[in-house]
Amino acid sequence: AQSVTQLDSQVPVFEEAPVELRCNYSSSVSVYLFWYVQYPNQGLQLLLKYLSGSTLVESINGFEAEFNKSQTSFHLRKPSVHISDTAEYFCAVTGLKAAGNKLTFGGGTRVLVKP
Amino acid sequence: ETGVTQSPTHLIKTRGQQVTLRCSSQSGHNTVSWYQQALGQGPQFIFQYYREEENGRGNFPPRFSGLQFPNYSSELNVNALELDDSALYLCASSLDREQPQHFGDGTRLSIL
């Protein structure tokens, strides 16, 4: 079984400032890791994923996350946020070779970008 | 390419009623998963269907049931609705069981 902890429920940040969203997981097996973003009244959009290979993964809109196996973390960062980044962000994990790819989500981090 | 579509977008029911939610998977995707997202929480896995067979189930009672059709679309059925069933129900499809999931916009179910 897996579990995910997102350490911050809410992160206020000024426009053009950097932001880091913290995610820690626990699992008895190797995992795939994901970040999803949810805008108001919408479903989840896949932001980026770690499946294998380089531990630093990047999205097309400037976010990056680093898989740290020893610290069981997958923190999300962006060096300069925009107003449009205001949303809720979910970290998720699934076990490799699990029966299906059931996603286990953290509780979410709400990012509020202020002008 | 059409994404995952869910219907209806909103639904209001009363306790004890039954409800059916529908999901059309993304083209070429043979795996559909359903999640329940209560207000202010992360989504919780309900179950997954792969090629019309249930392929994993979360900690939900039997009154939550599902189907997947030959075209890989899916239904979520909930019987004997309770107030705590009020939530956003999300459907996600993937190319295969171990591929990343792509979500629809959800059905918001309110129980009065």
Image (tube, coloured by chain):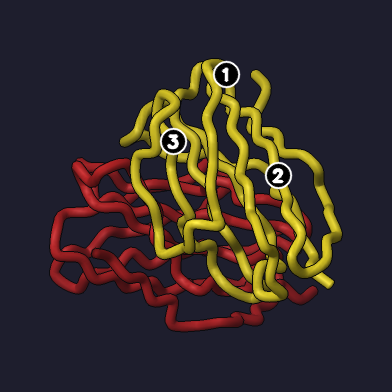
Looking at the rendered structure, the kind of residue marked 3 is: Tyr
Q: Calculate the distance from the C-alpha at mark 2 to the C-alpha at mark 1.
A: 22 Å
Foreground pick, B110 / A111 = B110
Foreground pick, A46 / A19 = A46
Q: Report the quarter where the C terminus of chain B lies.
A: bottom right
Q: Calculate the distance from the C-alpha at mark 1 to the C-alpha at mark 3.
A: 16 Å
Sequence-first disc among 1 and 3 = 1
Query: How would you rate the neighbour count of disc 3 (Cα within 10 Å): few for under 14, some for 14-19, many for 20 or more?
Result: many
Image colour assigned to chain B: yellow
Asked which secondary structure carries label 3, the reply is: strand
Q: Report the quarter where the N terminus of chain B lies.
A: top right
Q: Circle 3 is placed at which residue position?
A: B49
Identify the residue at horizontal 38%, vertical 76% (top origin).
A5
B44 with respect to B16 (left or right): left
Q: Where does residue A68 sit, x and y in percent of width and height?
A: 22, 64
Sequence-first disc among 2 and 1 = 2
Residue B16, quarter of picture: bottom right
Same subunit: marks 2 and 3? yes
Query: How would you rate the neighbour count of disc 1 (Cα within 10 Å): few for under 14, some for 14-19, many for 20 or more?
Result: some
| Mark in front: 1 vs 3 | 3
Q: Circle 2 is placed at which residue position?
A: B20
Sequence-first disc among 2 and 3 = 2
Same subunit: marks 2 and 1? yes
Q: Chain of mark 1?
A: B
Q: Chain of mark 3?
A: B
Identify the residue at horizontal 68%, vertical 73% (top origin).
B39
Looking at the rendered structure, the kind of residue marked 1 is: Ser
Identify the residue at horizontal 22%, vertical 42% (top origin).
A52
